Image (tube, rainbow, N blue to C red):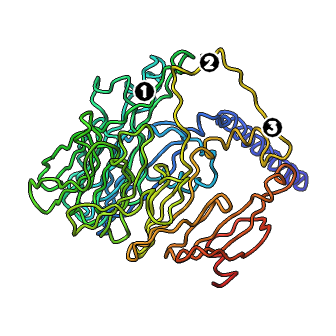
Amino acid sequence: MLKNYALNSARMRQLAAVLSLLALLSYAGAASAQQVKRPLTHNDYDSWRTIQAPQLSRDGKFVAYAFLPQDGDGEIVVRNIATGNEWRTPRGYRPPAPPPDDVANLGEFQAGQARLIRPVFTADSRFVIFSIEPTKEELRKAKREKKKPEEMPKNALGIMDLSSGSVTRVDRVKSFQVPEDGTGHIAYLLEAKPGEAKPEEKQPELKVESKAAITEPVTAASPAASPVEKKGKEKKKEYGTDLILRNTVTGTERVFTDVLDYSLSKDAKTLVYTVSAKKEENNGAFALNLGVEAGTPAGLLTGKGKFQKLTWDEEQTELAFLSDRDDAAATQPKFKLYLWNRRDPQAVEIVSPTTSGFRKDLVVSEKAALAFSLDGSRLFFGTAPTPDPEKDPDKEPLDDEKVLVDLWHWKDDFIQPIQRTRAEQDRNRSYLAVYHVKEKKFLQLADETLENITPSNDGRYAIGYDDRAYRRLRDWDTSYTDLYLINTENGVRKPLSQKQSYNLSLGQIRALFRW
């Protein structure tokens, strides 16, 4: 009897355990069913945020960065490292920008894009300066309303005071510069005032500079012009706008009108700018000594014409720029290269088409970049073939009367689609040249037989790339090139390697060939 009772008790306990387990599983299943997570969508991906362009203040007390979603409006975050306190302020929408067709400039493009969103601390760690772009909704609304490029929402400038976190907003700012080492001033260039830009004026192109933070405006593509409009288009003049020099200590501002390009030196002691005005006699390149209160800008080179490509050497003791002042009245003015020493009152001409050794079929390229070697002893610039004379639109046939034909020969270097892709690049092609500053000597380095040359940082040597013999192989094979070492002192070329199938950096080439 006792045995049967014990057996039944054990079975009851087992049954109770099983029932409890089933009840528990049922409850877990029901709870799980209630908490089923939905699958991720593209809207979720778009909301994911990343930290971009982090910056540390010079005194090490603050960190600032752009906090941006994949697709949407972002913000600037500034954190006090010691206290953990944060200030957040909207910075608007940064639309993704497609990479350039010219792969050689991809690195420069990516660096430029990073500079557009980067917050910048002043050297005294009192302020952080950043770009504020229009919101995504503002842009969408303007596009739906078919706004003209000059009517699209423009960028603004944000100036955050790190003592309080308060932000001063300045509207319609197309670019700004913050001195790298000096304090007391910042500079920013405004957009044209509403209604000021005329149809015959071309909107200025934005430059990306290496020594200061530069922002770009968000602009919409212009509506396609009709054939008649395209026929009647003429080369348009590019005019400057107001440049503001702001004293960060007192908050006072000084305005310079008709400014097209500018550069605030790293030590914050000199402001250099170029003027492009409707009264062309006011044009020129000017320098202002910021150590003299209410000083008068000095004309480095003035007169009718264009003044562009302001470029400092590494120590910022000298500045180079281009101008066509002496040939401004010509149909196709020729540019000259000028150099200004900060100790001198004016700039001097150093290279022109009449310079000894300058080829008669070349001109100084207005599109190629200027660059000094690290020690400032060499100035690299570009030359280009003399452009064809501009066609008279009144003598051209109408677009609907033209016959367009694509011609291709099997011995061409590139197939037709590649030729179309490279057309703009070929039209803007330039050949590297160098000016030896102390020796006052000009030397042409690149030409049609060696188009692509990259100088070393010290400027003593350069690497040349020649792919002419292998271009047709690209249709079924990979890319090849011959490598040359160029002595920039005398232009002598030394073959390094033939039919190289992969790109090598200057450092890799130096290690391999040990020059």
Q: CA distance from mark 1 to mark 2?
A: 25 Å
Mark 1, mark 2: which one is toward the viewer? 2
**Disc 3 and disc 2 in contact, CB within 8 angstroms:** no
| Residue 408 image label | 3
Query: What is the crowding at mark 3: few (fewer than 14 residues within 10 Å), some, or many (at least 20)?
Result: few
Q: Is residue 349 above or below residue 253?
A: below
Task: Let me know if residue 379 appears in the view.
Answer: yes
| Residue 149 image label | 1
**Disc 3 and disc 1 in contact, CB within 8 angstroms:** no
Left/right of residue 485 with respect to residue 343 in the rendered view: right
In the rendered image, the residue lying farthest to the left is: 293
Frontmost residue, 299 versus 198: 299
Q: Position of residue 421 (x, y in %)?
A: 68, 41
Q: Residue at x 45, y 48 (%)?
A: 67
| Residue 399 image label | 2
Left/right of residue 327 with respect to residue 169 in the rendered view: right
